[in-house]
Amino acid sequence: MRARLPYVPYASEPRRRFFEPAGHRGRRPLASRVPAHRPAAWPSGTPIHSLRTAATHYRPHGAASMQSLIENARAFSSSVAERRGDFTALAEEQRPQVLFISCSDARIVPSLITGARPGEIIELRTAGNIVPRHRTEANCAVGATLEYAVIALGVPDIVVCGHSCCDAVQDLVVGRPRPGMAMFSRWLQRAEYNSRPASVRRGVATQHHLKTQLEHLRSYPCVARRLRQRQLRLHGWFYDIASGEVLAYNSREIAFRPL
Ligand SMILES: [Zn+2]
C-alpha cells in the first residue's frame, strides 16, 4: 500500500536543466542563440560534436530540415557519452513521476516547458490533447497509455496541457469538418466539445475544452481508483505559445491561474 500523497502542488524550485538537446535551443536569449558567425546554411555532412554546438545553429523561424535532424541524431551519441552513467541507468528502467498529456502540435515540447530530464515524464500526445471518455470495449491508444502509466509505472501525477492557437480547438469552435480528413473529424467528436458564447476566443475555448478532457480522464477505472485512494493528482495546464506562460486550473476558484 502506498503512502498518501501530500498535496503541495507547484511549490518546488526550478531545477538546473539536465542538458540542452537541440529541441531546447529556443530557451536561450536570442542574442546568445544567434551568434554573428552563424552560417547562412547548415552544410550537409557537417560534423557536430555536441548538442551545445548544434544550439548555436538556431534558426528562429525556419523549420528544421530533415538533414539537420539527421545531423543532430548522429551527434547525439557523443552527447550521451558525456553522461554515460545517467543514460546507463536510464537503459535499466524508467521511473517517470508524471504522465503529461498534450496536443500533437509541433510547438508544444513538454520537456522544454517543464525542464524534465529524460525518464522523468511519460508523454501522451493526441490531436487537440483530447482524452476520449472511457469505453470498455475501445481499442484506444489513450486508454492503453493511461493504464500503463497509472498501473504499471504508478505515476502520481497526470497533467493535461492545452495550448493557445490550437487548430484542433479552433475546428471544434468553428464546427466545420476539414475536407478529406474524416478520421480527424471523427476524433474531434470524441472531445464532446459544447460550444458556448464565451468560447469564441481561442484561449477561453481551449480552457473550456481542457476541463472537459479532465472530466473524461476521471472516467477511466484505473484513474478513478487511484483518485479514490488519493494516490493520484490531476492537473489542467494551459500553455500560451507566444508568451511561454503556463496557467493551471484551480478547481476551487473554477479558473485558470498562473503557476
Ligand atoms: Zn493543439
Image (cartoon, helix red, strand yellow):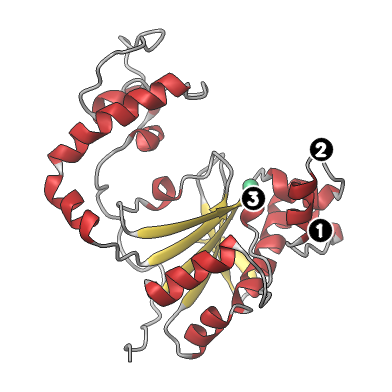
Mark 1 or 2, closer to the camera? 2
Question: Residue under circle 1?
Answer: 198
Q: Which amino acid does label 2 sit on?
A: Gly
**Residue 27 can be seen, yes or no:** no
Question: Residue under circle 3?
Answer: 127
Residue drawn at point x = 67 percent, y = 74 percent: 137
Please provide percent x and percent y for residue 28: 35, 33
Please provide percent x and percent y for residue 74: 29, 27
Q: Which amino acid does label 1 sit on?
A: Ala
- Tell which circle, 1 or 2, labels the residue nearer the N-terminal end: 2
**Camera-nearest residue between 44 and 19:** 44
Secondary structure beneath disc 1?
Answer: helix
Quadrant of residue 99 in the image?
bottom left
Q: Which amino acid does label 3 sit on?
A: Ala
Quadrant of residue 41 in the image?
top left
Question: Residue under circle 2?
Answer: 180
Residue drawn at point x = 73 percent, y = 62 percent: 191
Secondary structure beneath disc 2?
Answer: loop
- In the image, taking residue 247 as reference, residue 69 lies left or right, namely left
Q: In this view, does 2 lie above or below 197?
A: below
Residue drawn at point x = 81 percent, y = 51 percent: 173
Residue drawn at point x = 69 percent, y = 68 percent: 212
Marks 1/2: CA distance? 30 Å
- In the image, taking residue 222 as reference, residue 171 lies left or right, namely right
- In the image, taking residue 254 as reference, residue 85 lies left or right, namely left
Marks 1 and 3: CB-CB under 8 Å?
Answer: no
Q: Is residue 92 above or below residue 42?
A: below
